[in-house]
Amino acid sequence: MRFIYLPLCIALLALCGCGKDAQSTEAKEERNPLIKQGQTYMEIKDYDKAEAAFKQAIENNPRMARPYLDLATIYHQYQPDYVSSIFYYKRYLELRPDSEKAEFIQEQVQKVQIALANVILTQSGAVQAIKERDQLRQENAELKRQLAAKPKATTRPKTATQIIPEKSVTETIPKSATSTQATPQSYTVVSGDNLTRIANKFYGTDDYEAIYQANRDHMKSPGDLRVGQTLIIPNP
């Protein structure tokens, strides 16, 4: 029996040692100056500076797990970017699979995935609205073409009853087209996007100024884009 218990005790000691090593590593990372700086910024709700501090910590040491967790929290709770949040949560788990927070973080990943699914469903409704708008434009253009192709009236003077319907048609159609064309489009940022690329996609030129001005409330600079962010695209 003594020979059976001995390997078991050794295994238990090894497991305890691994747990202590993980805890000591996390404690050491939390003492990192950039981590402490980022957490201080989070306490005062300056999430942009906190984000910069955590990203600098990762740049200095990509194997440091703690900043991934902090960035995931920012993108989950304070500056919603659900795709990035899922990435950083999972990266933390890759670096710290034996963390005592592992189960909690898995739950957070599930919550973010549900939130992301809701965003996608909402945006799919916007896509449908855009399709309907484009269909209306085509119908209006076709109606204009048909009206332009109609034979001209004879020289016989028109009566009052003939004039009224024609005036109604010519006034109503441009209003419908104008109101349809005034509706801005929306676009969801994907990986690798920038304003120049998006402007080319919608306008066929590199001039992104109209897009930037339409989204100034949510952008600090033309380069301030996040994956999953929804942009308003003004009509050309």
Image: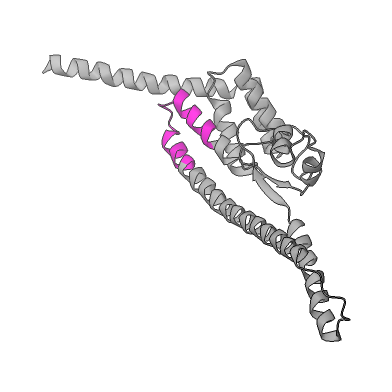
Query: Of residues 56 and 151, which is closer to you in this image?
Result: 151
Asked whether 115 or 186 is in front, the reply is 186
Question: Whole-percent x and y of residue 5?
Answer: 17, 19
- Quick one: which residue is furthest to the front in this view? 155
Which residue ends up furthest to the left in the rendered image?
1
- Note whether residue 37 is visible: no
**Residue drawn at point x = 64 percent, y = 39 percent:** 189
Left or right of 195: which side holds 78?
left
Determine if residue 185 is in view: yes
Q: Within the image, what quadrant is residue 46 found in?
A: top right
- Residue at image position (72%, 36%) is 200
Residue 44 placement, left or right of 17: right
- Location of residue 133 with respect to 219 vertically, above or below: below
User: Which residue is more in the foreground, 108 or 232?
Assistant: 232
Residue at 78%, 40% (x, y): give it: 212
- Name the spot of residue 2 as percent of width and height, x first: 13, 16
Q: Main secondary structure of the magenta part?
A: helix
Q: Quadrant of residue 175?
A: bottom right
Q: Position of residue 103 (x, y in %)?
A: 41, 37
Magenta highlight on residue 90: yes
Residue range highlighted in magenta: 86-109
Q: Nearer the viewer, residue 38 or 3?
A: 38
